[in-house]
Amino acid sequence: MGIPCGLRSTVILVCACAWLVGVCALENGLARTPPMGWLAWERFRCNTDCKNDPDNCISDRLFRTMADLVVSEGYAAAGYQYINVDDCWLDRQRAYSGHLQPDPERFPFGMKDLSAYIHSKGLKFGIYEDYGNFTCAGYPGVLGSLELDAFTFAEWDVDYVKLDGCYSHPREMDRGYPEFGYHLNRTGRQMVYSCSWPVYQIYAGMQPNFSAIIHHCNLWRNFDDIQDSWASLESIIDYYGNNQDNIVPNAGPGH
């Protein structure tokens, strides 16, 4: 498989601070050091036009290529482990069984097969969902199917789950995010749990309960979504620099 034009210069590697879960919470023992890897969203967004833009659309091909690049360019040797799918991987409807399913044209081999390929490279596989009726881009969310979706991810050998918060009331997140984490834990498979929980509450003028968030999530989002520009990245760096006195008390080895 050839390397899509421009990918070498646009691979964005992200290093996220992680949080160790407490006893009686996730109990997954993960993220003792910051998870490091590659996430599709910043560069490839929700491009689903594989007919006209096959090298840059959200597809099985893209993630296999990125897995190859992370290894061949030396990032894996430097500790970057995760290849993370973001929004727009799903079919518009669930299967008749109620299970989530990928878009059949863009992911013709299914997510378990993609997961196996990424694992064959010595890497780990991350996936995206949303605690709402829909994802931010309008695909099926986990609301109403939390247990089923958690076990589906385990069946696909997922290693990392990012749970967004579109189409969900911020007040419901205090219950919903812990509940989904509980089901992830019940699967018996270790999956890093990344929560967008606090940022939606901050946007709504609420004060997030960081004690609870630390207890139930491995890592979480505090600020604006990253855009495909240096200005966006700089604003995120500035946010964490300007707010470090509030952030540091919630951070430490594993959290």
Image: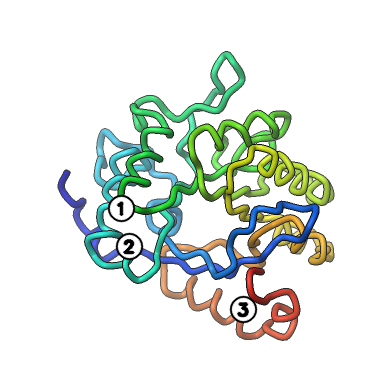
Q: Amino acid at mark 2?
A: Val
Left/right of residue 52 with respect to residue 85 in the rendered view: left
Real-space Cα distance between discs 3 and 2?
Answer: 23 Å
Q: Is residue 62 above or below residue 7?
A: above
| Residue drawn at (38%, 44%) of the image | 47
Amino acid type at mark 3: Tyr
For residue 106, above or below residue 85:
above
Measure how far apart labels 2 and 1 are at the Cα level: 8 Å
x, y percent for residue 65? 26, 49
* Neighbour tally class for label 3: few under 14, some 14-19, many 20 plus, Cα within 10 Å: some
| Other-residue count near label 1 (Cα within 10 Å), few / some / many at <14 / 14–19 / ≥20 | many
The N terminus: image quadrant:
top left
Residue 239: image tag: 3
First of labels 2, 1 by sequence position = 2
Mark 2 and mark 1 in contact? Answer it, CB < 8 Å: yes
Q: Earlier in the sequence, mark 3 or mark 1?
A: 1
Q: Which residue is mark 1?
A: 66
Decide which of 40, 160 is in the foreground and name it: 160
> Residue 177 location, x and y as percent?
74, 48
* Residue density around tag 2, few if under 14, some if 14–19, many if 20 or more, within 10 Å: some
Q: Which residue is mark 2?
A: 11
The secondary element bearing badge 1 is classed as: helix
